[in-house]
């Protein structure tokens, strides 16, 4: 990395922290901290949900699949878009109509306090471990991009990077709450797409243009399916992520933070629409890198894996102008920061609203606000500790994540189904988890069910939990569970009429300023990149024009 790259990276990280802290002025209560007061614009919520799906694994795992298999990686990621559109049509508005503060509140009132504790502690442990692994991954990836990617990476540098990144994310999430998460996610969306859009034309030029690409593509590289990624797999992938986007707490929080059910649906539609078109854009660099750096014939599996996992960052390093590598690294950080901040905010919200508030029996908003920020800080430090300990855990962290993933659909299926079917009871959770989890462990770690339907992960992970839930819901006898919606006046919950959000133009102003800053940054880099003046000037002009349009809109609100 050159000095301009370091400067750009530093400025972007500093800007992210400052933006999050500046939004603390909007946080006056626990509702503001964890639900943006129910007044977030729908587009802000939708972009945040889009970014919540990203992490360093997006570039390592999906970039690697794109490098090895080609277009099938794009198709797999487009499944998220289909799942989000289905969630928008079916459940996003329903969540908002309930008038609840947090998704955990619904679990408690619908299934009881034992179910609340089970969901809270299990899902928190699962997500905290996974988030710590993502923080470790992004620190490792960024140090490798910076040039410290040798056989033995310096533990001191790695731990320092983890601590710096953790402090930034904890800082803006703790002070700005969900407002900071939403706005910084949107800024991270801008940074990510700007960096990738600059890479694409340069990568095409690097391999000889579109005609050269078409003649040098590996056989089967443009197939929509391949290997184990069959159409049946894709259907299952849509189903799994429908449950995730429709019922996982970080996504439900996005439906609750907007003014009306209509806004909740629109945010999910924006999320889904972006995921239908954007995977082709941000997976093109590793696909083009396959042409620039093909897999050697007879290469060992470890060599192929290493080439695939580093394809994304190497493709960017090979073509980016001076200073733009720093922007790309900021985008890598931003993708993971979005996931970390979302998990921090949602679980600190649950601990504050659903565990701490009933325990101390207080409605003092000042006390709840301090507790929420303390929980955010503590959870953030735990995530940083897990990230630092990851190299010493060997395969333990991966095993924990692998095992707990077996329970995602069995856990979420009863909750999602209960939004439609009144007769779903707490016993549905006990049966789906009690049957599907042991079965999933057996299927994954033994060969007992080889050549049977149970050996298929789609059936075992999606079909069986649904079958159990529906069987219990429609069994003879028993009465339905009645859920009384919460108070309807919470930030306009349940109303279809547009709520007044005119007092919150600050997020739009911040987005406009960020666009203007990125445009000015590209203009400054033109003097260092005489060979890319036209490209940088074009992107700078587009950024500045959009910034001006958005700023003008803030004056009209």
Image (cartoon, grey):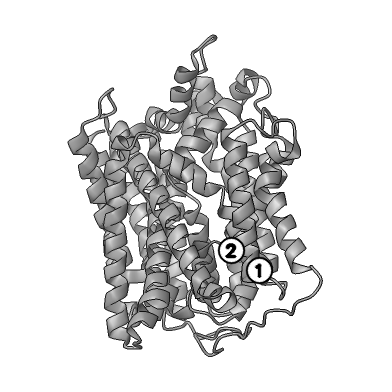
The numbered mark at residue 191 is none
Looking at marks 2 and 1 on the same chain, the residue that comes earlier in the sequence is marked by 1
Q: Nearer the viewer, residue 330 or 298?
A: 298
The numbered mark at residue 91 is 1
Q: CA distance from mark 2 to mark 1?
A: 8 Å
Work out which quarter of the rendered image holds the N terminus and state it: top left
Q: Does residue 8 show up?
A: no
- How busy is the neighbourhood of tag 1: few (under 14 within 10 Å), some, or many (20 plus)? many
- How busy is the neighbourhood of tag 2: few (under 14 within 10 Å), some, or many (20 plus)? many
- Residues at badges 2 and 1 in contact (C-beta under 8 Å)? yes
Locate residue 386, reporting x and y percent. 31, 47
Q: Does residue 459 show up?
A: yes
Query: Does residue 441 appear left or right of residue 155 in this picture?
Result: right
Locate residue 514, reporting x and y percent. 36, 60
Please name the residue shown 29% across and 28% down the image: 149
In the rendered image, the residue lying farthest to the top is 298
Of marks 2 and 1, the one in the foreground: 2
Locate residue 72, reporting x and y percent. 64, 34
Mark 1, secondary structure of its residue = helix
Q: Is residue 32 above or below residue 475?
A: below
Query: Does residue 489 appear left or right of residue 338 in this picture?
Result: right
Q: Give the image quarter of residue 513.
A: bottom left
Mark 2, secondary structure of its residue = helix
Please name the residue shown 65% across and 71% down the image: 425
Q: Is residue 160 above or below residue 351?
A: above
Q: Is residue 182 above or below residue 354?
A: above
Locate residue 9, reporting x and y percent. 28, 46
Question: Count the marks: how many?
Answer: 2
In the rendered image, the residue lying farthest to the left is 156
Report which residue position mark 2 lands on. Answer: 247
Q: Nearer the viewer, residue 336 or 525?
A: 336
Q: Give the image quarter of residue 177.
A: bottom left
């Amino acid at each position: 990395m050159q000095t301009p790259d370091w400067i750009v990276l530093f400025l972007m990280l500093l800007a992210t922290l400052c933006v999050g802290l500046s939004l603390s002025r909007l946080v006056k209560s626990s509702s503001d901290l964890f639900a943006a007061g129910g007044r977030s614009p729908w587009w802000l919520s939708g972009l945040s949900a889009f970014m919540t799906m990203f992490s360093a694994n997006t570039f390592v795992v999906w970039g690697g699949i794109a490098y090895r298999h080609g277009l099938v990686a794009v198709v797999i990621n487009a499944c998220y878009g289909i799942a989000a559109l289905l969630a928008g049509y079916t459940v996003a508005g329903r969540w908002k109509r309930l008038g609840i503060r947090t998704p955990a509140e619904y679990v408690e009132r619908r299934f009881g306090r034992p179910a609340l504790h089970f969901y809270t502690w299990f899902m928190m442990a699962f997500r905290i471990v996974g988030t710590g692994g993502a923080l470790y991954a992004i620190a490792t990836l960024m140090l490798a991009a910076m040039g410290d990617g040798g056989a033995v990476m310096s533990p001191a540098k790695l731990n320092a990077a983890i601590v710096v990144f953790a402090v930034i994310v904890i800082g803006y999430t703790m002070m700005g709450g969900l407002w900071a998460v939403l706005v910084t996610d949107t800024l991270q969306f801008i940074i990510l797409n700007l960096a990738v859009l600059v890479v694409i034309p340069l990568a095409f030029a690097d391999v000889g243009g579109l005609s050269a690409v078409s003649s040098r593509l590996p056989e089967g590289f443009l197939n929509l399916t391949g290997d184990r990624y069959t159409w049946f797999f894709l259907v299952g992938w849509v189903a799994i992520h429908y449950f995730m986007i429709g019922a996982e707490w970080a996504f439900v929080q996005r439906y609750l933070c907007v003014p009306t059910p209509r806004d909740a649906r629109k945010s999910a539609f924006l999320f889904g629409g972006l995921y239908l078109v954007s995977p082709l854009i941000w997976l093109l660099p590793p696909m083009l890198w396959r042409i620039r750096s093909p897999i050697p014939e007879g290469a060992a599996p470890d060599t192929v894996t290493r080439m695939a996992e580093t394809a994304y960052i190497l493709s960017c390093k090979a073509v980016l102008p001076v200073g733009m590598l720093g922007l790309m690294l900021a985008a890598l950080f931003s993708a993971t920061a979005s996931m970390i901040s979302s998990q921090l905010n949602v679980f600190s919200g649950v601990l504050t609203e659903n565990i701490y508030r009933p325990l101390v029996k207080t409605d003092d908003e000042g006390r709840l606000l301090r507790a929420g920020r303390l929980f955010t800080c503590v959870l953030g430090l735990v995530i940083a500790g897990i990230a630092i300990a990851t190299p010493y855990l060997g395969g333990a962290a991966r095993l924990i994540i692998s095992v707990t993933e077996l329970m995602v659909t069995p856990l979420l299926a009863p909750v999602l189904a209960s939004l439609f079917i009144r007769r779903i009871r707490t016993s549905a959770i006990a049966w789906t988890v009690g049957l599907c989890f042991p079965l999933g462990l057996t299927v994954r770690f033994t060969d007992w069910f080889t050549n049977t339907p149970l050996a298929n992960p789609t059936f075992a992970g999606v079909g069986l939990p649904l079958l159990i839930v529906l069987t219990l819901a429609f069994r003879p006898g028993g009465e339905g569970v009645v859920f009384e919606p919460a108070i309807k006046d919470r930030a306009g919950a349940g109303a279809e009429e547009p709520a007044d959000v005119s007092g919150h133009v600050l997020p739009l102003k911040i987005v406009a300023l960020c666009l203007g800053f990125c445009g000015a940054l590209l203009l400054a880099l033109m003097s260092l990149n005489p060979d890319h003046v036209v490209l940088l000037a074009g992107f700078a002009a587009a950024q500045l024009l959009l910034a001006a349009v958005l700023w003008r809109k803030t004056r009209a609100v």
